[in-house]
Each structure stands twice: as structure tokens, then as C-alpha cells.
Image (cartoon, grey):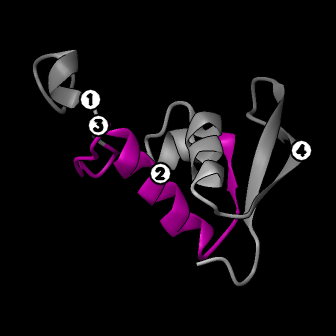
Amino acid sequence: MDRLGTTHAANVGRDKASKVYSTDTANQRQRILNRLHTATLTTLQARQELDVMHPAARVQELRKQGHSILTHWMTDDTGKAKHRVACYVLFAGDQ
């Protein structure tokens, strides 16, 4: 057992502050888009901060919806290893 609940299923979609996030793909896309309106977003940030486990798929879906999102590749050091990760940027003027 962990501090948030008695089972893994009880904890799915919760962040450190116990805020419940929907795992529905539409909600994941909206979280990414909201973030991109204010800042860039890396793959690791999407997983850790927005609870989106496959951000590349959600970004691709957003692009198919007409959003102009650029991918910039960078290296992120997690403290355990260095990883090549995507950094997503929403073009200015994209609504």
C-alpha cells in the first residue's frame, strides 16, 4: 500500500498533490495544449507534471487537429542517465 490509496488502481491519474487527472486522450491533449500556450514542454515534463505517458502520440493528434507544434530535440539529464527527449513548442498565433 502507498500513501494515496490501497491499490494501484486507486492511484491512477493522481499527481503529488492528489489532484485527479483523467486518462482520456482528449483530456491529455487539452492538458498539453494548455501548457504549450504558456511554456515549452518536454517529454519528461509531460509524463511527470501532466500525467501523459505517451506525449508524442498526443502531440501528433494535436497536429492532425491543425495545431502548429514544433519538435526540438534535446538531451535531458535525469541524474541517472542522459536521454534524448522532445521539447514541444507551439507556434505563436496558434489558437
Q: Which residues are magenta?
A: 15-43
Q: Residue 66, percent across and down?
A: 63, 61
On the rendered structure, is 72 left or right of 44?
A: right
Tag shown at residue 74: 4
Is 3 colored magenta in this rendering?
Answer: no
- Cβ–Cβ under 8 Å for marks 4 and 2: no
Camera-nearest label, 1 or 2: 2
Judging by the rendered image, the residue that carries numbered circle 2 is 29
User: Alpha carbon of mark 4 to alpha carbon of mark 2: how far?
Assistant: 22 Å
Residue drawn 10% across the image and 19% down it:
6
Amino acid identity at mark 1: Val
User: Alpha carbon of mark 4 to alpha carbon of mark 1: how far?
Assistant: 29 Å
Amino acid identity at mark 3: Gly
Amino acid identity at mark 4: Met
- Mark 2 falls on what kind of element? helix
Badge 4 density bin: few <14, some 14–19, many ≥20, Cα 10 Å: few
Judging by the rendered image, the residue that carries numbered circle 1 is 12
User: Alpha carbon of mark 4 to alpha carbon of mark 3: how far?
Assistant: 27 Å
Q: Residue 63, percent across and down?
A: 66, 52
User: Alpha carbon of mark 3 to alpha carbon of mark 1: how far?
Assistant: 4 Å
Is 26 colored magenta in this rendering?
Answer: yes
Q: Is residue 33 above or below residue 79?
A: below
Amino acid identity at mark 2: Arg
Q: Residue 92, percent across and down?
A: 75, 81
The first of marks 4 and 3 along the sequence is: 3
- Cβ–Cβ under 8 Å for marks 3 and 1: yes
Judging by the rendered image, the residue that carries numbered circle 3 is 13
